[in-house]
Image (tube, rainbow, N blue to C red):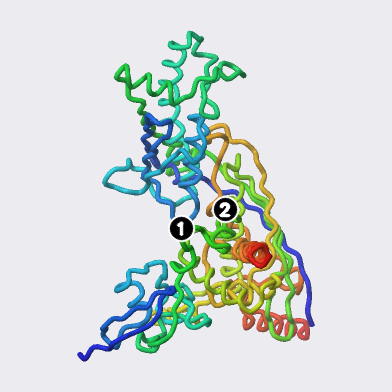
Amino acid sequence: MAQFHLEMKVNGKAIALDIDPGLRLLDVLRDILHLTGTKEGCGEGECGACSVILDDELVDSCLILAPQAYGREVITIEGLALNGELDPYQQAFLEVGAVQCGYCTPGMILAARVLLNHKPKPSQQEIARAISGNLCRCTGYAKIVQGVEIAASIKETKEGVSRA
Amino acid sequence: MKKRGYGLANMWYGIGNTANPNPSGAFVDFLDDGTAIVLTGCADIGQGSNTVLAQIAAETLGICIEDVVIISADTEVTPDAGASSASRQTYVSGNAVRLAAEKVRDQVIAIAAEILNLPTETVNLYQGEIWNSNESSGVSIKDIIIKCRSKGILTLGHGSYNPVTTMLDPETGKGIPYATYAFATQVAEVEVDTETGIVEVKQIVAAHDVGTAINPQNVEGQIEGGCAMGIGYALLEEVILKDGEIQNPGMSTYLIPTSLDVPEIHTIIIEESEISGPYGAKGVGEPALVPTAAAIANAVADALGIRIYDLPLTPERVVAALKSAQEDSKKV
């Protein structure tokens, strides 16, 4: 089969690859780039485990053909902890115990990041709505919602400090 | 019309397998640098057993949890610790780790007592140091382990634990099926829309006797997760079979609770220390889910004055029950 020349940015890094055009973005991320933080759950866009950020929008990477990411910017869970330092979401999730089996966690954190980019101080209801496309079977969501709230306040403090 | 109701449900639940051998094993190695490695076959599938087992080892060895490395669920190197099922790992594998760590601790205490010229009965390991009764000797555990090495002594321990049960009598059903039990009471508040049949859970209070809660945050997480599954069981989840084939094999047809379906869950941890458990712990995994659907169904019965005997309490089922109750009352 003819190869597709894919150029995109992943976690701030320019990527150029020749791929089978039928691959999903999820396959390229996990199997070719070995960014296995992104999980495959249902594989049909219903559970949110494979969520990534594509140009500031949360998408199910199992529903995006890799060629659709051409020229665009993808952020995966690996793009958060830069220089080995945990980012506010990871810090907050650890602090409140929002991670149990961990399968939904990368998607949850990226969903929260998209929410907080648009709404820096969301209510609990807004957080619950923003993560409602990301299924979790083991935490009962309470600690995840709490984690996002704490991440928002950590971010606010950090950004306040960096502005000052 | 929207009607409110409250329902309560109680449960007790045996920890471990029913009257069957149910052993777990563990190895502990206290290293020269004062840290410890724990090997256990216990698989952490998200319930937090690695954390809890590290806490148990740290507590027994008198070191901080950051100094414990857990190697778990690797059949190439770890001893059998049974399945992560039956709410048994904290209780059974926790005891195995405690026993293994106690063997190591006793070795270190014996050498420390000899070197420091203290009676073994009063020597203790605490906060990385050797203590005599309630006073630190100022000598670190690490120094004693180094001394052990200079004498050619390795500080290793193994432990295994099998809960004490007896087989059930096939005629009478009598026996001791479990070594210990968890207890819980949950209360659900619901709002039922009598037009649409939609049941909304407004809040759940979940009080659980877990023995000593070795990690209260994990226990809360387990209870919250169990309640969420219970909400799914009560209101949403149904495998529809037709000619042996599942008709709803997807997340959009077999619904599980989303973040919008789970209300505030107030967890109350009852710490009734269990004498046979590691530091008094029992288990919480399955118990968290057991009473939830019953509490919700009782709350729906309280709201409507009608008892529905089939789960899940889908809008269709609730509307049908209301309708048939109405028809019955006309007949009278």
Question: Which residue is rendered at x = 43% and y = 12% of the image?
Answer: B115
Give the distance between the C-alpha atoms of the residues marked 1 and 2, in whole angstroms: 39 Å
Report helix, strand or loop for mark 2.
Answer: loop
Q: Chain of mark 2?
A: B
Could you say where residue B182 lies in the image, as x and y percent from the top left? 58, 45
Mark 1 in CB contact with mark 2 (< 8 angstroms):
no
Amino acid type assigned to the residue bearing label 1 in the image: Gly
Quadrant containing the N terminus of chain A is bottom left
The answer to which of A153 and B256 lies nearer the viewer is A153
The answer to which of B221 and B299 lies nearer the viewer is B221
Could you say where residue B173 lies in the image, as x and y percent from the top left? 48, 44
Q: Is residue B85 above or below residue B230?
A: above
Q: Is residue B201 above or below residue B176?
A: below
The number of discs equals 2
Residue bearing mark 1: A84
Residue B329 visible here:
yes
Could you say where residue B301 lies in the image, as x and y percent from the top left? 72, 70
Residue bearing mark 2: B287
